[in-house]
Amino acid sequence: MIRENEASRLSFFEAAWVIVRRDFRAILFSRAFFFFLLGPLFPIIVGALAGGIGGQVQREAIVNTVALAMTDADNEALLVASRTAKGKVDGLPEIAVIEEARRDSSDFSPEDLLRTSNYAVVVTGTLAEPELSGTHTQIHRWDGAVSLLAAMASGTAPTSFPEIIERQVETTAAAAKSNRIRTAQAGQLLLFLLMMLLAGMVLSNLVEEKANKVIEVLAAAIPMDSVFFGKLFAMLGVSFVGIAVWGAFGAGIGALAGESLPSLPEPALGWPLFILLGVVYFSMGYLILGSLFLTIGGMATTVREVQTLSMPITMAQLLVFFLAAFAMTNPGSPLELTAAIFPLSSPFAMLARAAQSSEVWPHLLAITWQALCVAAFVKGGATLFRRRVMKSGKGGRGPRDRGARTASTAGK
C-alpha cells in the first residue's frame, strides 16, 4: 500500500510512474493476459469481411480523368461528344483539356504529363487515329470509351469506330496514387483492429479495481489525474508487448509463406517513417480512446452499466473509421480535413495521408493536436470521476477525508 505521507511528496509524473509500474507488472504477469494474446485470431475474420468494403473504396479511388492533348478542333469535338453522351452512356471518363501553350511546347510529352499530373491516360493523335498514353491497365480501361467518343465526334458512329493506338508507360502519378491507396487502407484497418482489441483492457481494469475498492485507496494517496495517466500509459505499454508478440508470430508466418503473400506499394513517406508514424498514431489513438473508456469505467458501477455506456463510443469509433476510410479518397477535401481534425478519426486520417503524401509538417501539427486532446480528455475524465464517483457521506467527502477522520479518531 502506498503511504500518504510519501505520496504527498511525489510530483505529478512521479505519482503517475508509480501507477504505470504497478499496473504494468500486475497485467503482464497475469494468466488472463496470456489468453488475451490469443484474441487476434478472431479479428482475422473481421479483416476478411472488411475486404468487401475495402474493394469498394479501392474502386472509388481509381482516377477517371482523361486528358486531351489533340488539336483545338478535335478537343472541342470530343468535349461536345462527351457532353452529349453524358447520362446516356455509362462508364464515360471525366475530360480535361491540356492548354494549347503547354501541348505545343517543345518539351511536352504525354509520358512526362502522366508522371507529374493526376490523369489516367492522355489522348493525342487525331479523331481517326487516337493515341492513348498510359499504363496497360488504364489504357484497356478507357480505350473503348475514347473510341466511342472519337466516333461520335467524327460522325462515324455507330457504324465505324477508330482503332486505338496504345503507347504504354511504366507508371504514372495516377497509378501511384491508386497503389498507395492500398497501403493507406491496410494501415487504417490494422490501426482500427489493434485499437478496438486493446482499448477494452483499460475499461475492464478500472471496473475491477472499483469493485475491489482498490481505486479508492489509490485516490486517497495519489491525485486522480496521476492515477488516470498512469493507468493509460501502463495499458499502452502492455499493448506494445502484445503487438510485439503478435508481430513476431506474423513475421514467422510471413517467412514461411514467402512470396505468396501480397505485397503493398511503398508509401509516399517511405516505409521507415510510415511505420514510425503508425506507432505514434496508434499510441495517440489508444490514449484518446482509452481516456474515454477510463471515464466510462469510473462512472459505471456494474458490468452491465459498462456495456451500456461504452456502446455509444464503440459505435462512434466504427463511424469515424468509415469516415476516415472514405475521406482518404479525396486528399485535401473538407471531408478529409474534418477527419484529420476530429480527435477520434485523426489518427486514421493522418496515417492514410502518410501513405499518400510526402509532406511531413502536417503530421507534426496533428501529433501536437492529438497530444493536447489526450491531456484534455484525461483531465476531464479525472475531474468527472472525482466529482461524481469519489464523493461519499455528507458534504461530499472522499477517501482522503475519511482517512484523515480515521487518523484523528485513532489519535484521541
Image: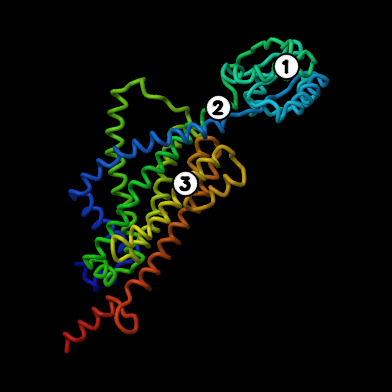
Q: Is residue 397 left or right of residue 69?
A: left
Write the residue at 61% across / 29% down. 63
Q: Is residue 176 left or right of residue 411?
A: right
Tell me which amino acid carries mark 3.
Pro
Write the residue at 32% across / 52% down. 200
Q: Earlier in the sequence, mark 2 or mark 1?
A: 1
* Of labels 2 and 1, the one closer to you: 1
The residue where tag 2 is placed is 176
Quadrant housing residue 5? bottom left
Q: CA distance from mark 2 to mark 3?
A: 23 Å
Q: CA distance from mark 2 to mark 1?
A: 22 Å
SS assignment at label 2: helix
SS assignment at label 3: helix
* Of labels 3 and 1, the one closer to you: 1
Q: Quadrant of the C terminus?
A: bottom left
The residue where tag 1 is placed is 124
Tell me which amino acid carries mark 2.
Ala
Towards the viewer: 93 or 371? 93
Q: Where residue 140 sits: x, y (%)?
A: 60, 17
Q: Are marks 2 and 3 in contact (CB under 8 Å)?
A: no
Tell me which amino acid carries mark 1.
Thr
Q: Where residue 301 sits: x, y (%)?
A: 30, 66
Q: Is residue 81 left or right of residue 287?
A: right
Q: Residue 347: which numbered mark, if any?
A: 3
